[in-house]
Image (cartoon, rainbow, N blue to C red):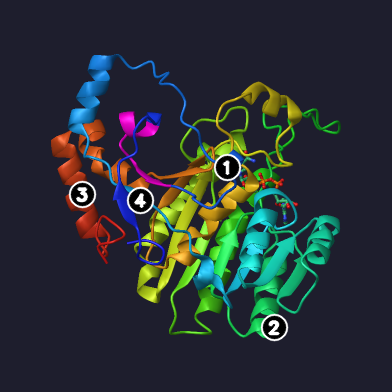
Amino acid sequence: MWGDGQSTTTFWSGSRIDQICTNRVFSVPDLPAHHRYKSRPETSSHHPRERRRIQHTLPKMTTYEVPVDFRNIKDKTILITGCSTGIGRATAKLAYEHGAKLALADWNEVEAKNLLAELRNTDRLLFYKTDVSKWDNILQVFQGAWKKFGKIDAVISNAGINQENLLDEEIDEATGMLKAPSLKNLEVNLVAHIYVVKCAVHYFAKAPGKRSQIIMTGSAASYIDTSPLYQYCAAKAGLLGLMRAFRTRLISKNITINMIAPWMTISPMLPQAIVDMWGTLPANSPAGVAHALLLPVVDESINGKVFFVAGNKITELEDKIHECQHIWMGAQLSEDVDEGQRRLVPAGIHPEQK
Ligand SMILES: NC(=O)c1ccc[n+]([C@@H]2O[C@H](COP(=O)([O-])OP(=O)(O)OC[C@H]3O[C@@H](n4cnc5c(N)ncnc54)[C@H](O)[C@@H]3O)[C@@H](O)[C@H]2O)c1
C-alpha cells in the first residue's frame, strides 16, 4: 500500500520499461501535463525472441499509481542540503507548500536568500550557509534545526557537484612530480552524505517514538557508467552501497533510508551542450525529481528502495534487481548468496525481512 492506502494495481502498456524489465513503476500524477512522461516507440536493440525469453523468465510486474497525498508532510521538520538551486530548491518549495518546517543548507547563500524571500521568510524556515564536505558545517545545521524546531523528522541529503578533472595532469614545479588530484568531488558527493547519515541518526534519537527518514540523492551514475565523471560515478555508486548497508540496520532504530537515482535532469548542474545533445530523450524537471525525493517522507513504510527517475517517471530498482538475481548469477550461486546474506545480515537479505 502506498500514500494514503488508495493505491491501485494496474499494468502499464506501451512503455519500454515494462516490456523489458517489468519493474515496479511509481507515477507522479499531479505534475503539470508537460512534465509527464510520454512513452516512446520501442527502440531496444534486443532481438524479439530474446525479449520474449526475458519476459517469460522475469516475474510479472506490479505497477502502482501513487496518489501523492502530501498531508503527511505537514508540520514535519525536514532538513535539506543543496537547497539553493535545481532539485533541492524544488524539493524545498514542494515540502514547504505542504506545510513542512525546513532546515536548509547550501554554500550558495545568494540563491538561498532568494529562495527564502520567495517563501516569505516565515518562522518555518531556517538556513545555514554550509559546505557539506565539512563536518562542523553539517553539525551546525543539525544542531540549529533541533534547537529551533525541537525535532528533525526527515533528512534529504542532496547537495552535489559534477566538476572534476581526474585525468588532467598537474606537475609540481618544485619537484617536477605529478601532483595529487583534488578529491573534492568525492568529499561532496560521498563523504558529506556519510556525515549527514551520522548526524541524522544522532539527532533523530533526541526525539524518539516516531519513524524518521533519510533520503539521499544518488544518480543514474550509481548504476550506469557516466564517463568522464570518474569520481562522480564512484561517489554515486558509493551512495548506493551506503544505502544498502544501512537499510537492514537503521530500521531497528525506526529510521528508513532510501535513495533516488535521477537520470538526466534539467538543472543548473548541466552544461547547455549536454542539454542540446540530449535532445528529445526523456528528461526530468527538478519538480519531478522532488516528488520522488519526498515519497519516502509521505509513505513512511518505504525502506531500502531506489527510485530511478527518468522523464519524471519513478521506477523502483532494488526489488527487481534482487528478484532477477538468479538470472544474472545463476540459480545455485544466487541461492547460496541469499543464504550467506541470511546468515551474515541479521535482518535477512531484504529490507522488508526485519
Ligand atoms: N541534474 C542532473 O542531471 C542530475 C542527475 C543525477 C543526479 N543529480 C544529483 O542531484 C543533486 C542536485 O543536483 P541538481 O541537478 O539540482 O544541480 P544543482 O547544481 O542545481 O544543485 C546542487 C546544489 O548543491 C549545492 N552544493 C554543491 N556543493 C555544495 C557544498 N559543498 N556544500 C553545500 N552545498 C553545495 C549547490 O550550491 C546547489 O544548490 C546532486 O546530488 C546531483 O549529483 C543530478
Q: Are marks 2 and 1 in contact (CB under 8 Å)?
A: no
The dot on residue 64 is: 4
Image quadrant of residue 92? bottom right
**Dot 1 corresponds to which residue?**
33
Q: Are marks 3 and 2 in contact (CB under 8 Å)?
A: no
Q: Amino acid type of disc 3?
A: Asp
Q: Is residue 210 above or below residue 157?
A: below
Q: Which residues are magenta?
A: 17-26
- In front of the other: 40 or 320: 40
- Marks 1/3: CA–CA distance: 43 Å
The x, y position of residue 80, in whole percent, is 64, 63
Q: Quadrant of the C terminus?
A: bottom left
- Marks 1/4: CA–CA distance: 19 Å
Magenta span contains residue 23: yes
Q: Secondary structure at mark 4?
A: strand
The reply to whether the residue tagged 2 has its Cβ within 8 angstroms of ligand 1 is no
Q: Are marks 1 and 4 in contact (CB under 8 Å)?
A: no
Magenta span contains residue 291: no
**Dot 3 corresponds to which residue?**
338
Q: Residue at x 57, y 49 (%)?
A: 31
- Marks 4/2: CA–CA distance: 38 Å
Question: Which label's residue is closer to the chain start, 3 or 2?
Answer: 2
